[in-house]
Amino acid sequence: MPNRQQPFESSFAMRDGPLMIKDIIRSNWQNPQFAFLSACHTTVGHEESPDESIHLAAAMQFSGFRNVIGSMWSVDDKIA
């Protein structure tokens, strides 16, 4: 769930509650290599600030992941 006013408060919706970007940044992972974000629109910013690169995939790279794959479109659950 993106948070445009407080980007570090953005989160991933998980089964047992939100996984906050700030918690990922604070984690103690050593040299994280790869993150695959299989949710829709994880690399899409906000239409009012198209030059800003604040989205969930960018936040994962900022957190230290060397490689991040995200999505710019929606996929129907029945097809996926």
Image (cartoon, helix red, strand yellow):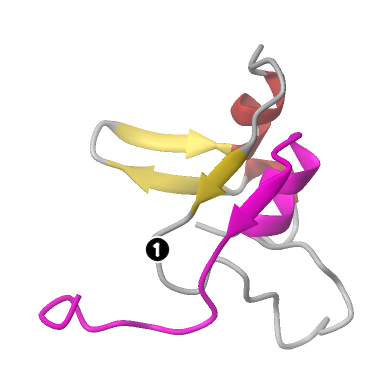
Would residue 16 appear left or right of 72 to someone viewing this image? left
Residue 77: name its quadrant: bottom left
Residue found at the very far right of the displayed protein: 51
- Label the magenta part by its dominant secondary structure: loop
Residue at point 86%, 72% (across, down): 52
Residue at point 81%, 84% (across, down): 50
Report x, y in % for residue 72.
Answer: 54, 80
Q: Tell whether position 21 is magenta.
A: no
Residue 58: name its quadrant: bottom right
Note whether 37 is above or below 76 in the view shown.
Answer: above
Report x, y in % for residue 28.
Answer: 66, 11
- Residue sitting nearer the eye, 56 or 48: 56
Q: Tell whether position 60 is magenta.
A: yes
Note whether 46 is above or below 32 in the view shown.
Answer: below
- Residue sitting nearer the eye, 51 or 9: 51
Q: Which residue is mark 1?
A: 39
Report x, y in % for residue 41.
Answer: 50, 74
Residue at point 33%, 34% (across, down): 17
Report x, y in % for residue 35.
Answer: 54, 45
Residue 70: name its quadrant: bottom right
Which secondary structure, mark 1?
Answer: loop
Would residue 23 appear left or right of 31 to someone viewing this image? left
Note whether 64 is above or below 62 in the view shown.
Answer: above
* Dot 1 alpha-carbon crowd within 10 angstroms: few under 14, some 14 to 19, many 20 or more: some
Residue at point 23%, 39% (across, down): 15
Residue found at the very far left of the displayed protein: 78
- Quarter holding the C terminus is bottom left
Note whether 77 is above or below 15 in the view shown.
Answer: below
Point out the stretch of residues depicted in magenta: 56-80
Would residue 17 appear left or right of 50 to someone viewing this image? left
Give amino acid for label 1.
Answer: Ala
